[in-house]
Image: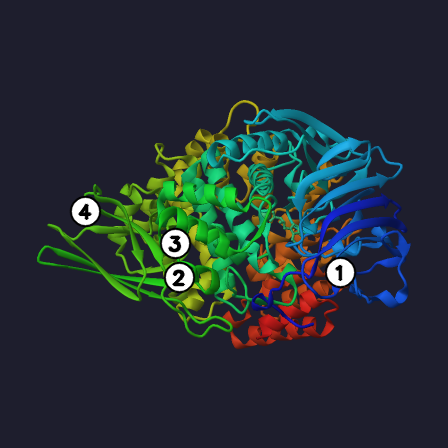
Amino acid sequence: PQPKYLADYAPPPVTVTHVDLHFRLDPLATRIRARLTCERREPGEMVLDGEQLKLISIAMDGAALDPSRYTLTDTALTLHDAPDRFILETEAEIAPETNKALEGLYMSGGMYCTQCEAEGFRRITWMLDRPDVMATYDVEIEADLPVRLSNGDEVAPGKWHDPWLKPTYLFALVAGNLVATSDRFTTVEGREVALNVWVRPGDEGRTGYALDALKRSMLWDERVYGRAYDLSVFNIVAVDDFNMGAMENKGLNIFNSRYVLASPETATDSDYANIERIVAHEYFHNWTGNRITCRDWFQLCLKEGLTVFRDQQFMQDERSAAVQRIGDVLTLRARQFREDAGPLAHPVRPESFVEINNFYTATVYEKGAEVIGMLRRLVGPEGYAAGCALYFERHDGEACTIEDWLDCFAEATGRDLSQFKLWYSQAGTPVVTVREDFKNGRYRIDLKQETPQTPDQPNKAPLVIPLAFGLLGRDGREIQATRIHALDTATDRLEFDLDEKPILSMLRGFSAPVILQHDQTDADRLILLAHDTDPFIRWEAGRMLSKSRLMAAVTDGAGFDAGWLDALHRLATDEAADPAFRALALALPSEDDLAGSLHAASVVPDPDRIHAARKSAQRAIADRLADDLPALRAAMAVPGPYDPRAADAGKRALGATLLRLQTLRDGGDAARAAYAAADNMTDRMAAFTCLLEARDTSVAAAFEQDWKHDRLVMDKWFMAQVAHADPSEAVAQAEALTQRADFDASNPNRFRAVLGGLSAGNPAGFHRADGAGYALLADWLITLDASNPQTAARMSAAFETWRRYDADRQTLMRAALERMRDAASSRDLREMTDRMLG
Ligand code: HT7
Ligand code: ZN
């Protein structure tokens, strides 16, 4: 397949202004009658997309269309000599039950559902399946099923009208035997909205948190962005088989059930937080994505980067802002920096693709959100609000580009954003190097920025990088409050007249997605850790202290010094600090983070040494904290009924960290007791994983016995046993789990639990020197690719780091990639493997 290019964009010669759909649902022979109101805009043929459809009939303006007037292929229906205005009627037949790709109309757990983003609508009927064709919709669903849902407002049972213009990717249909938990919301404009969360009977007791998160999201968007909801109903449906997290279809959001269903017994604190974030994210798309959509898929970050930024703002407002920001930075570094440093690096707005599904990436989403955050930092909160207001007013009902978005900010603030725009086109993570000098009362900061080469982009221009910084005295007092310096040249210098050399607190709040190279002394980092006014910098200083110890332990077998262990002891026992922050500060950099940093420092990472060094660091911390562990753990006990909110969740997080340390000392005694006493899934999983790490698998059988009826809980069980296995046993463990009758490879959650549990959860196991981990993953991805290319291609990114490793591992990983490339049945996996092989 040929790549598509941003530069080749052209509007369609004929467009569709209204879509009438009639569905007669049947697992193996669903019939779809489509009636499209078409209007010519320019000369040219009308080429409708359509895939895996059986044509039953075709008519134009009420008369059967002569075969000479159209051409039908596997992927398109071309109309020859179409008039300027006409009605096109087609009837198609499809088999939702056999659709395991989970794109288009498919069946999950006995219900019908759809996934149309990005190009799934063409598997339902012939249509201009592109986001710049926006139409109103009428939908009728014929089926002997109690619940029949589509977009918009219900005008009669099973009949829906969506008055808002929307592209095909926001179309949705759901039908099945479902039950709803319902509520109401009155918008600031006085609109009464019925809210429903639809689930399978039996799951209705687990919908309360999603519904609560939805109401809070609606209020927040009114309060913070002035955006109100615009239909009489907002439906959310939970589906077990789903490729991603959720989908923002107009008025009918469809969710992976793991991001809807939660009860204290079955969901962990992080499940609750994910539900809150994803419910908010999909709701916020109603304005950033739906009312204003993307002109083409190259503009994906226009809706995704902005909506991630909005969900991050929401979570900061609803929970602890500091803890949320640190978590977002951890995710960005773990996923996006890794992507940017390897063969899959691409700009936030890619310029070409073969398969758009391969570009729902950390770069488009998370770096896209950071770009919005930088824009806000540069133009200030008022400028940002003015730019957003102009965007919503000017482009409502349109399909837009990044240029449209930036023009609103340039116009609202009078700023020239042409250099800032490079953030959208230039791939790679900039490295900002800081050097300090203090002489005769003059303090200088020399700054340098450099963006490394990435595929197809050998030369990089300087970016505009907002650097938020402050200065501390040696006593820890702040002598310069936060200032933002926009670094927009390759080098720059800042100068201050001061009595003594200060301590530089650079990149406060992680003000730009860059790698900071700043050789600070341990003494400076300890002062920042103890005193900086910015919580991100306090955490970062602690992390740098830990990282330097771990890197030295890996490379030179260095031990762990008392100064560092004392600092961690002070953190752990600091009762004034937020427990969630303490838990984050005690967490060591991940094995993958260390491998990436070693590679960046030109050291070939050895996964076994990294694993061993982390373990011995944890043991050293456990020994240093030994006397305090019982009291600290007791202080983290959370009395009363389970509450998922941040305060209690933070205590449980620190409690789990301490239990992990305790387990290293007592071999699992405390964890066994904690497992027996746990009355919620957060505590139960913490104890279970501690025991797995202590190589006590005795509770695994009891866990299974207790939860074998619950698919989502069993996903945790599957994943934990691989991710927390001894690295030497992880591959065998994963392989054994795939042989079980309840390992259903067609369910993406279960597949990810086992194979993702290996590739992402157990790096030393995955990178086993004999290549067994690579071989197992490659085998399974080749198998999955035949039915579900999207998930197979996504998970193949586990191999994106192959060039980091030693020659033997490189040979083995390359062989696995070549094998996948040669066996790929989809363009999805083919494109991914081609790009990784380079
Ligand atoms: N906009 C949604 C993306 C999505 C998706 C993309 C490709 C294939 C399947 C998918 N399911 C959902 C979700 C979001 O980012 O909000
Ligand atoms: Zn999104």
Q: Amino acid under label 1?
A: Asp
Q: Earlier in the sequence, mark 4 or mark 2?
A: 4
The part of the image, by quadrant, that contains residue 442 is bottom left
In the rendered structure, are the residues bearing label 2 and label 3 in contact, judged by CB atoms less than 8 Å apart? no
Q: Nearer the viewer, mark 1 or mark 3?
A: 1
The residue at which mark 4 appears reads as 474
Tell me the kind of residue under disc 2: Met
Describe the element under mark 1 as helix, strand or loop: strand
Q: Quadrant of the C terminus?
A: bottom right
Side (left or right) of 165 relative to 79: left
CB of residue at label 3: within 8 Å of ligand 2? Answer: no
Q: Nearer the viewer, residue 615 or 297?
A: 297
Q: Which of marks 2 and 3 is nearer the N terminus?
A: 3
Three-letter code for the amino acid on which mark 3 is drawn: Ala
Q: Name the residue under label 2.
A: 551
Q: Distance between the residues labelled 4 and 2?
A: 27 Å
Q: Name the residue under label 3.
A: 512
Q: Distance between the residues labelled 4 and 1?
A: 66 Å
